[in-house]
Image (cartoon, rainbow, N blue to C red):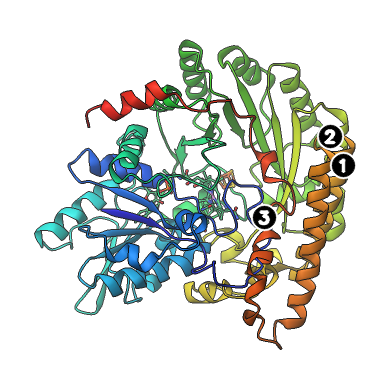
Amino acid sequence: MILLHSPSIYDFRKEVIMYGPVSDLIPSSPIFEMYPLGFLTIVSYLEERGYSVRVVNLALRMMSDTAFDVQKFISKLKPIAFGIDLHWLPHVHGSLEVARIVKEEHPDIPVIFGGLSSTYYHEELIQYPQVDYVLRGDSIEPPLYKLMQCIESGEPVNEIQNLTWKEDCLVKINQISFIPDSLDYVDIRPDLMIKMVAKHRELKGVLPFNGWWDNPITAIFTVKGCTHECLTCGSSKMACRFVTGRWRPAYRSPESLIKNMLEINSFSKGPIFLVGDIRQAGDSYAVRLLNLLKREKIENEIIFELFDVAPKGFLNEVDSSVVNWSLEISPESHDEEVRKIQDSTILYSNEELEKMIEHALSLNCHRFDIFFMIGLPKQTRQSVMDTISYCGHLLKKHDRRLSTFISPMGPFLDPGSKIFERPEEYGYKLFARTLEEHRQLLTRSSWKYVLNYETAWMSRDELVEATYDAAERLNQLKLEYGRIDKSTWTEVVERIKQARKLKKQLDNYENKIDYKQSANLVGEFWEFSISTICDKQELYWPSHPINFKPIGILKMLLKPK
Ligand code: B12
Ligand code: SF4
């Protein structure tokens, strides 16, 4: 099987689009070159059952090599099936185009789609001639294995769980009935990824994002589903019930997490990010995990995500169990009212937040990242600027270990989220609903027109302006409180200035001039969509002189399947 990860927009190398700072707070660039973590569980599950699986990060290969010819590359591949992720909705343009190329080159090789957005839009997605199967749900490894067997043997697929497919031009839909209660049925096997690199002699196609080699952060998922109800989240408690049929979260056992962390530790010194708040599964789960961490003394930086304010006892426990640790939390707004609307299950005040920060920083916490967002219900432009003043307050009060970030919610509101499903009720206006409408939005000239929403409190124009205003002010505060040096400050200032200028140009052009003629602008647009609201480097932990352990890598290469 070959798993292909497409760029968000195909072919971004030729298009003249100002993507905007939609990816400044994640490792990816605006074309979202990071593939889903789920690729790794698919690889493990299928490889352990005899299939050879190759991951090709087409997005990263296209980014790294302007001459990389996707069509030619695809024409040489001959798998039993191609798998393409449409997990994040912003990939709707790229994934459908890559699928079209696959079909053009290999009309007889099936194309399987999967991921959260594929699940939400399965009925529309299957109508595209280049899509043969959609596997729905947040966990699909066993049904995918069965599908591969059926494709190989020619047997009918009508018994396969979670499957949507076409038969004699009719769309057939099986229920999502594979919804595991525990996630321990599959491991993540880094050794298989290392072997994949050796086998295909190709590193770029397997790397998760541009720059990973220098900042080798790895993410480990702890949970699928959530107990929280963030209005804007496509994987909240309610969204999961509606989209993937999951009624309660499923967790990976602490033992499975530790095994995975030890494997990562054996070849990499990079930080390990635990996706999901480990307290969600209950105190005993968190204690079990922390006890295992204490026993294993893993030296990699372990980053814990907090969904709400953690009590002192928990932080003390982390401190006494983990060698190197950091925290991150997303209060979203300084305004407690806005925060309460965004997630009614979270009720913490700024005072409680600050007490927790103080306590964590009095321990050995290496770094505490605080994330805020633009585009929330009841949030005005003034409220965004007040959030930035609050960032200033936090930066002033604490040492360099505390960082604050802000980003716009975008490019799209998540399908399945309460806000997407009932926009008017929450004061939102949607500019796209269907898959095709979103695909078309992605071809607009700038991120202002790509955004699929505006709110009763900020128009699309105001959302964009508020983003640049906030970024400018935060950049200034970071310089003032010693978080960045003068040259980083200057670069961000310059990029914001240019981004504003280009935005104005595009506003003038949008309906009049064929701006796509301006091929010479491609590079410029790209440049002013990366690190405009902060320097991407601020996201990373200091790297080691040598990030990897060659002996560990060698051992993994020699490890039997
Ligand atoms: C961790 C995480 C991230 C990590 C990335 C981790 C990664 N590489 O997967 C970071 C922080 C970088 C991130 C970034 C983004 N994220 Co995010 N992320 C999550 C989070 C919290 C958990 C996802 C997870 O770990 N899943 C577990 C893994 C193992 O499963 P999986 O990857 O989903 O794969 C399974 C299935 O989806 C499916 N599947 C996936 N791909 C394929 C392909 C095929 C062929 C098949 C058959 C099946 C299949 O099978 C897999 C195995 O069972 C979810 C929220 C949540 N609680 O779920 C949001 C979430 C998925 N992200 C979301 C969004 C919007 C984004 C961004 C676009 C935000 C932004 N503007 O920056 C970016 C896009 C990043 C990119 N591609 O470059 C939305 C998606 C909504 C939507 N429908 O589009 C979610 C639901 C919530 C949210 N708003 O954050 N994200
Ligand atoms: S954004 Fe909120 S609802 Fe979504 S996964 Fe995170 S905590 Fe859960």
Task: Check the image and name the residue furthest to the front.
Answer: 67
Q: Could you say which quadrant of the image residue 31 lies in? A: bottom right
Instruction: Residue under label 1, please give it.
Output: 477
Upstream in sequence: badge 2 or badge 3: 2
In the displayed orientation, state which residue is furthest to the bottom: 512
SS of the residue at dot 3? Answer: loop
Q: Earlier in the sequence, mark 2 or mark 1?
A: 2
Q: How many marks?
A: 3
Helix, strand or loop for disc 1: helix
Identify the residue at image location x=67%, y=37%.
Answer: 329
**Of marks 2 and 3, the one in the foreground:** 3
Residue 353: image location, x then y, percent: 76, 32
Residue type at numbered disc 1 = Leu
Determine the residue positioned at 65% across, 34% down: 328
Give amino acid for label 3.
Answer: Ile
Query: Disc 3 versus disc 1: distance between alpha carbons?
Result: 20 Å
* Residue name at image x 82 percent, y 37 percent: 485
Asked if the residues shown at circle 3 and circle 1 are in contact, with their CB atoms under 8 angstroms apart, the answer is no
Disc 2 + disc 3, Cβ < 8 Å: no
Give above or below for 560 relative to 372: above
Residue 476 point in image, percent of width and height: 87, 45
Q: Earlier in the sequence, mark 3 or mark 1?
A: 1
Q: Which mark is residue 185?
A: none
**Element under disc 2:** helix
Disc 2: which residue: 395
Residue under circle 3?
Answer: 530
- Contact flag, marks 2 and 1 (Cβ < 8 Å): yes
Q: Report how far apart the C-alphas of labels 2 and 1 lie in the structure.
A: 8 Å
The residue that appears at 83% across and 41% down in the rendered structure is 391
Please state which of residues 19 and 48 is positioned toward the viewer in this rendering.
19
Is residue 254 something that shows in the picture?
no
